[in-house]
Amino acid sequence: MNIAVFVSGRGSNLRAIIDSNELKNLVEVRVVCSNKSGCGAFDVAHQHNIPTYSISSEKVDGYINYEELLPILKEEKIELVVLAGYLKLIPPFFVREFPFKIINVHPALLPSFGGQGMYGIRVHQTVFDSSVKISGATVHFVNEEYDRGLIIAQSCVDILNVKSPEEIAAKVLEAEHELLPWVIKKIAQNKVEIVNNRVEIKE
Ligand code: GRF
């Protein structure tokens, strides 16, 4: 299965996908896209000879817009778009082009601690301040609202005795690096179904 990965940061989730033994011979990262051409994730892509595209809805030198990106993804026969730390909202027309074929990883247990502006350490600071005793990672389908698509899978981490939001972030990131490749594998194996507006994953 050919996938496109959208990134904005250092690219640890992209690296986890590329390095995943479970995805070898099953999934190929064909393109990496970002709203930040200087992001660390592009270095990860270039180390693996994966083409990168800088995306902007505005007119910016060296960037293309979503309308220009679409034919490139179709040409690459992309079957799944993975948002791995991508901080921009995907335009509705683009979501409609990939029905239930765009997934996102969020570093908290949605629907809590999600939505516009909830990204990076801000998520973990809010979790820390809320006094909850578990956090975790969520992978969900992307629709036209931030972090609101059907939840595919979640993974919990114990934060009973953490001393800082940074400690939560580190525990959750580890969970993301396991959960996201696992979900991609299940999608590649056609083991993900939607039944009564819930996502079921076959063994
Ligand atoms: C991850 O925590 C992800 O959940 C969030 O942004 C971070 C991306 O990290 N959306 P990386 O760029 O994959 O290292």
Image (cartoon, rainbow, N blue to C red):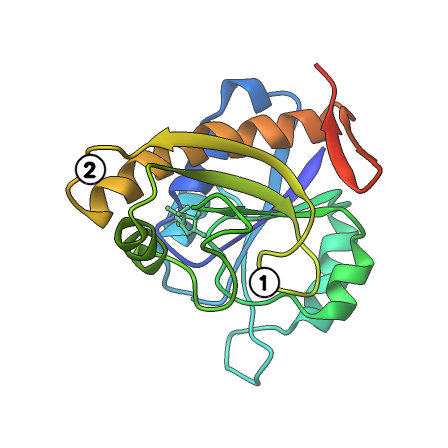
Q: Quadrant of residue 12?
A: top left
* Picture residue at 46% right of the left edge, 46% below the top: 45
Foreground of the two, 52 or 141: 141
Mark 1 closeness class: few <14, some 14–19, many ≥20 residues within 10 Å: some
Disc number placed over residue 162 in the picture, else none: 2
Disc number placed over residue 3 in the picture, else none: none
Q: Is residue 129 above or below residue 172?
A: below
- Give the side of residue 100 with respect to residue 153, left or right: right
- Give the side of residue 6 with respect to residue 102, left or right: left
The secondary structure type at the circle numbered 1 is: loop
Whole-angstrom CA distance, mark 1 to mark 2, is 28 Å
Q: Name the residue under label 1.
A: 146
Task: Determine if residue 48 is in view.
Answer: no
Q: In this view, does 144 lie above or below 130?
A: below
Q: Where is residue 46 in the image (x, y as percent from the top left)?
A: 43, 47
Task: Determine if residue 13 is in view.
Answer: yes
